[in-house]
Amino acid sequence: MSTEYDLSVVIPCLNEEATVGLCIQKALDSLKKNNIKGEIIISDNGSVDKSVEIVKSFNLPNVKVVHCEEKGYGNALKTGFSAANGKYILMGDADDTYDMSKIYDFYSKAVSDENISMVIGSRFRGGIEKGAMPFLHKYLGNPVITMLIVVLFGAKITDSQCGMRLFKKSDFEKIDFKSDGMEFASDIIIEFMKHNMKIVEIPTTLSKDRAGRKPHLRTFPDGYRVIKFILKKRFLNN
């Protein structure tokens, strides 16, 4: 029997042993501090380090790991979302670049208005630590992708690629998402807009990766894939 939660925190993970435990602890502290009945789900996408072992070491009923066999950021998130039992779902990365202690900022905004379907963060409004975002991502890739989503779908946002966002699970389940990779971040926004679901933006921050961490994002291949995906969604009605 599943347990009903107010909030499910879903974190995709691929070889993040240096930070996944810190993210979980920050999330747990934030839930407790703000009296939110919540769970934390780590969706592991094939880690070969100690990430899964670290998650299991918490040994708490509201901290669990699920395994996603199909590779891809979108696949990992969808697997985690499927396992979530909360009314709301908050997604964030396992590399500690997004501050899990700020969960309440997203949650409180969502519960303040029942008509809000998604609360998305903006790193451009909240602050980007020096060196946290590559030059091309900050001044070319993200602005271009965001502009396309704003112009083609009418979203009122400034940071379409922010990986920390919260939404109603019931609204998410109304949509059949097909994307499986990095384009999934754009797909959620586009589909929510197409279904006339209300999206609001709040400031959030981005911190620098830990030294020695290999980034999962591939600037040019992933950027091209996302732009192609957006154009197909608009002009081929996919």
Image (spheres, rainbow, N blue to C red):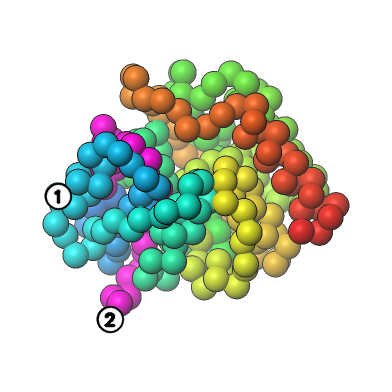
Q: Which mark is residue 57?
A: 1
Secondary structure under tag 1 reads helix
In this orientation, which residue lies closer to the viewer: 195 or 46? Answer: 46
Q: Is residue 105 visible?
A: no
In this orientation, which residue lies closer to the viewer: 220 or 113? Answer: 220
First to last magenta residue range: 1-24
**N-terminal label among 2 and 1:** 2
Q: Is residue 194 visible?
A: yes
Residue 161 x, y percent position in the rendering: 58, 40
Tags 2 and 1 in contact by the CB under 8 Å rule? no
Vertical placement of 170 versus 104: above or below? below
Q: Which mark is residue 214?
A: none
Amino acid bearing label 1? Ser
Compute the Cα span from label 2 to label 1. 23 Å
Q: Is residue 6 magenta?
A: yes
Amino acid bearing label 2? Met
In which quadrant is the N terminus drawn?
Answer: bottom left
Which residue matches tag 2? 1
